[in-house]
Image (spheres, rainbow, N blue to C red):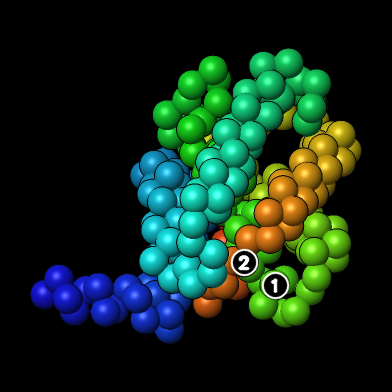
Amino acid sequence: MKNKMWRFLTNPRKATYLLLLFYAVGVAGMVFEFSRPWFIRLIPFALLLSTFLLIIHHKGTKNMRMAIVVAVLYLAGFFVEVLGVNTGLIFGEYSYGPGLGWKVFNTPLMIGLNWVLLIYTSASVLQSLGWKSPAIVAGGATMMLTYDLVLEQVAPVMDMWTWSAAGVPVQNYISWWVIAALMHALVASNRLKFTNRLAMPVILIQFIFFTIIYIFIR
């Protein structure tokens, strides 16, 4: 039974189907107010599931340098959010809700993982298209900014975070792009290869997930 499950999870096509099913159920749960609170609790699990599947499908660089860079990306992503949410200096005035799970210094531990996941998937997609390092830095940051443009519209409804202002400040998008570019530059400068057939499905499914929720709840 365990071998069958492992073969299922390590098959890119079947793993993609699993993600599609999981996020499709998530859409159904999120668009209805009566079920939304229950599905909000699954947001951390969704991030963990996506990360786990990416890990087992990773075929690129596997060494200590990559482990260190990933750790740095996590810590950088987490602490820039700690600074941001506690001072309002980076992204603007905002606060985290319970949607992303446990918090330290008013910041969900999962937010660092989210930065890693987005850097990894966007870099992997662009590397698979044959893009070179300078273009990946700019292109990867732009991919992540496009992703964030949609995510920001649904984050409050999903209890992930809310802004003090009436709308999302432009400062947030500028900071998001600059930080993403710096993180991609770190990956590029260390010549890490992110080869993963599940990278495109993960980031695309998540983007579609947020887009559909936005269409239904706006």
Q: Position of residue 5 (x, y in %)?
A: 22, 74
SS under mark 1:
helix
Q: Quadrant of residue 90?
A: top right
Neighbours of disc 2 within 10 Å: few (<14), some (14-19), many (20+): some
Q: Nearer the viewer, residue 22 or 109?
A: 109
Q: Nearer the viewer, residue 162 or 2?
A: 2
- Evaluate if marks 1 and 2 touch, with contact meaning CB atoms under 8 Å apart: yes
Q: Residue at x 45, y 76 (%)?
A: 16
Q: Position of residue 109 (x, y in %)?
A: 48, 33
- Per the model, the C-alpha gap separating discs 1 and 2 is 8 Å
Mark carried by residue 73 = none
Check disc 2 and report the residue beneath it.
193
Q: Nearer the viewer, residue 92 or 120?
A: 120
Neighbours of disc 1 within 10 Å: few (<14), some (14-19), many (20+): some
| Amino acid type at image mark 1 | Gln
State whether residue 99 is above or below residue 118: above
Q: Residue at x 39, y 58 (%)?
A: 52
Does 114 sit left or right of 39 as displayed?
right
State whether residue 20 is above or below residue 162: below
Does 97 sit left or right of 14 as displayed?
right
Mark carried by residue 127 = 1
- Which residue extends farthest front? 64
SS under mark 2:
loop
Q: Earlier in the sequence, mark 1 or mark 2?
A: 1
Q: Position of residue 126 (x, y in %)?
A: 72, 71
Q: Residue at x 78, y 30 (%)?
A: 91
| Amino acid type at image mark 2 | Lys
Does 74 sit left or right of 123 as displayed?
left
Q: Position of residue 216 (x, y in %)?
A: 62, 59
